Image (cartoon, rainbow, N blue to C red):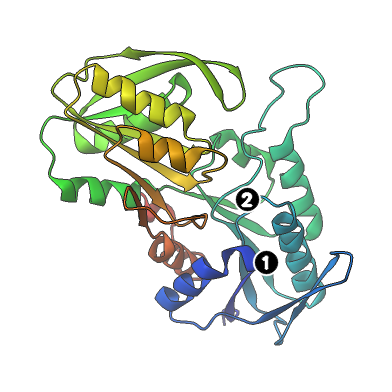
């Protein structure tokens, strides 16, 4: 007899967890979040979870309270005798800190892995990590979902002629190549040089975008400096149109202004992170059905890789 399954959410991702629960066909469990006057948090499951498989949905974008709340939810579930605690982070915060790029810096992605394991996580589910090798930071089951299952059908629905996929940097070329293979298109790379995080010094296009409908593909968009400059440059090089697709819409600082003022036709993102503001140039595709299918397959001991294109 399999354990019952229950889905809960942290406060940061409740909007997404509600949609996942609807697609899964199970009501979202209720959690109380108490905040003391100094900001300290305490969580409380309002129902018994003894012997249940618990899915806790919480992306760990800033503020850091989102990560702390997730850790408290994991700890509370373990102490309440849950059978299995599955941590679902649609967006894995601190994933950009996956290695030491210079002396005396932290490796934030590994630190997050350590504290999740210490809190009592039994399994991790996430989507489009900034660096795939983060999976190796965990010695427990890890399901890494791929947004191609959401983006590729949308791209096919556009029925664009002369389609070409572009990566906004060398590091994302493998991701862009996957999209190009799915769609049977060519690949362009925009080579960029940074002077510091979130600041691009120079860019150059490798490939020919002239007369093409270009799709820029990335895992996340933060200040939108790279994606907007790449879009403008591709248009100057003769592209018919440029769209951008990024799984995680961090969109901090001047991001919205840059996107609106750029020559990008649209920015297509998912709902792993909620938008701070709506704009007709930004289209959101939901990953809730994909996560709901993943939950079902995990619970039924079925292959999760069948969800990938």
> Alpha-carbon distance for marks 1 and 2?
21 Å
Q: Quadrant of the N terminus?
A: bottom right
Vertical order, 225 against 259 (above or below): above
The residue where tag 1 is placed is 85
Q: Nearer the viewer, residue 302 or 265?
A: 265
Residue drawn at x 46%, y 62% as measured from the top left: 291
The picture places residue 51, in percent across and down from the top left corner, at 69, 80
Q: Nearer the viewer, residue 79 or 207?
A: 207
Residue 106: name its quadrant: top right
Residue drawn at x 72%, y 23% as measured from the top left: 100
Vertical order, 160 against 37 (above or below): above
Vertical order, 234 against 18 (above or below): above
The picture places residue 63, in percent across and down from the top left corner, at 70, 52
Q: Residues within 10 Å of mark 1 (few under 14, many from 20)?
A: many
The picture places residue 219, in percent across and down from the top left corner, at 46, 39
The residue where tag 2 is placed is 61
Is residue 44 visible in this depiction of the protein?
yes
Q: Residue furthest bottom?
A: 47
Classify mark 2: helix, strand or loop. Answer: loop
Vertical order, 133 against 270 (above or below): above
- Residue 227's label in the rendered image is none
Is residue 309 visible in this depiction of the protein?
no
Residue drawn at x 60%, y 47% as measured from the top left: 92
Q: Residues within 10 Å of mark 2 (few under 14, many from 20)?
A: many
Residue drawn at x 24%, y 16% as measured from the top left: 237
The label nearer to you, 1 versus 2, is: 2
The picture places residue 252, in percent across and down from the top left corner, at 56, 42
């Amino acid at each position: 007899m399999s354990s019952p399954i229950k889905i809960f959410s942290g406060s940061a991702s409740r909007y997404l967890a509600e949609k996942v629960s609807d697609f899964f066909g199970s009501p979202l469990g209720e959690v109380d979040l108490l905040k003391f006057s100094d900001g300290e948090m305490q969580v409380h499951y309002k129902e018994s979870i003894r012997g249940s498989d618990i899915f806790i949905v919480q992306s760990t974008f800033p503020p850091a309270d989102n990560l702390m709340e997730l850790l408290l939810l994991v700890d509370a579930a373990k102490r309440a005798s849950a059978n299995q605690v599955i941590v679902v982070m649609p967006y894995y915060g601190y994933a950009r800190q996956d290695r030491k790029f210079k002396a005396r810096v932290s490796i934030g992605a590994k630190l997050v892995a350590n504290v999740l394991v210490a809190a009592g996580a039994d399994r991790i589910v996430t989507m489009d990590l900034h660096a795939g090798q983060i999976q190796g930071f965990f010695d427990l089951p890890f399901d890494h979902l791929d947004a191609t299952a959401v983006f590729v059908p949308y791209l096919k629905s556009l029925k664009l002629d002369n389609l070409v996929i572009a990566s906004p940097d060398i590091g994302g070329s493998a991701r862009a190549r996957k999209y190009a293979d799915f769609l049977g298109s060519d690949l362009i790379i925009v080579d960029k040089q940074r002077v510091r995080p979130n600041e691009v010094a120079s860019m150059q296009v490798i490939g020919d975008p002239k007369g093409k409908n270009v799709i820029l593909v990335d895992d996340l968009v933060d200040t939108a400096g790279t994606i907007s400059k790449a879009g403008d440059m591709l248009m100057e090089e003769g592209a018919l149109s440029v769209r951008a697709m990024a799984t995680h819409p961090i969109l901090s600082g001047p991001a919205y202004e840059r996107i609106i003022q750029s020559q990008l036709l649209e920015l297509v993102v998912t709902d792993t992170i909620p938008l701070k503001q709506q704009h007709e140039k930004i289209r959101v595709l939901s990953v809730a059905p994909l996560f709901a299918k993943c939950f079902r397959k995990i619970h039924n001991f079925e292959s999760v890789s069948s969800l990938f294109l």
